[in-house]
Image: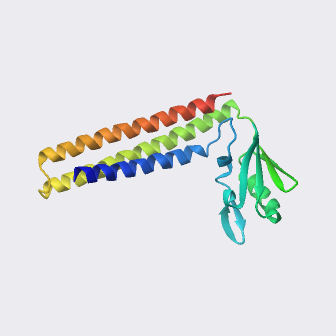
Amino acid sequence: MINEIRKDIINKMDRCINLFMQDINTIRTNKVFPELLAGINVSYYGKKTSLLTLANVTVQDTSVLKVNVFDPSINKLIEKSIKNANLGFNCFTKGDSIHVSVPKLTEERRKELIKLVKKSAQKHRVHIRNIRREANVKSKTCLKDKIITKDKDYEIQSIVQKLTNDYVKKIDNILLNKERSLMEI
């Protein structure tokens, strides 16, 4: 019973950490990486399709991404989608590929991005704590239904609390690393 609850909590909390990582990986630092374009959707044959499924995105140099579109006939469509995403990127077509120029971050923009990252971290900390609350309610219900003893309930709650502390600490460490990378010039 305890191992079941523990595995369930670890799975849910790992999922939460992964979602947090996905969230903040789309927030750019001064380094360019293909995932900067992950949130861009292109209207392709009437459906919203992720840019990353329609093209291969590579880093050309420190501030330029190269987008090699699988179907060159939609270059203009992709270029328009990148411009409409309001990410502040400049793009131009060169041959069969699209080059996306990513400007350096200003001090003001860095601070805005740090606020965004902190907000996301707080949202995921709350989610971790909600997982803890659900596990504690489940444990109390089992105690009330006499499925487990008070000792087992206490043991479960202490395991849940330790896991919660560990995962909140992971979020804090990820947040700290992202803040550092955002403040690098």
Q: Residue furthest bottom?
A: 46
Count up the numbered dots.
0
Q: x and y percent of residue 119 in the render?
A: 51, 41
In the image, farthest residue toward the right: 95
Residue at the (43%, 37%) spot, across then down: 170
Q: Residue 121, image x and y in percent?
A: 48, 41
Tell me which residue sits at (68%, 47%) in the image.
34
Residue 14 vs residue 133: left or right? right
Please say if 47 is above or below 116: below
Quarter containing the N terminus:
bottom left
Work out whether residue 127 or residue 52 is closer to the camera in this orientation and state it: 52
Q: Is residue 131 left or right of residue 154?
A: right
Residue 134 picture location, percent across and down: 30, 52
What residue do we see at 82% from left, 65% from top? 73
The residue positioned 78% from the left and 64% from the top of the image is 71
Q: Is residue 25 above or below residue 46?
A: above
Q: Looking at the picture, does residue 12 appear above or below residue 158?
A: below
Image coloring type = rainbow
State the image coordinates of residue 176 (x, y, percent, origin top left). Answer: 51, 32
Left or right for 11, reference 148? right
In which quadrant is the C terminus drawn?
A: top right
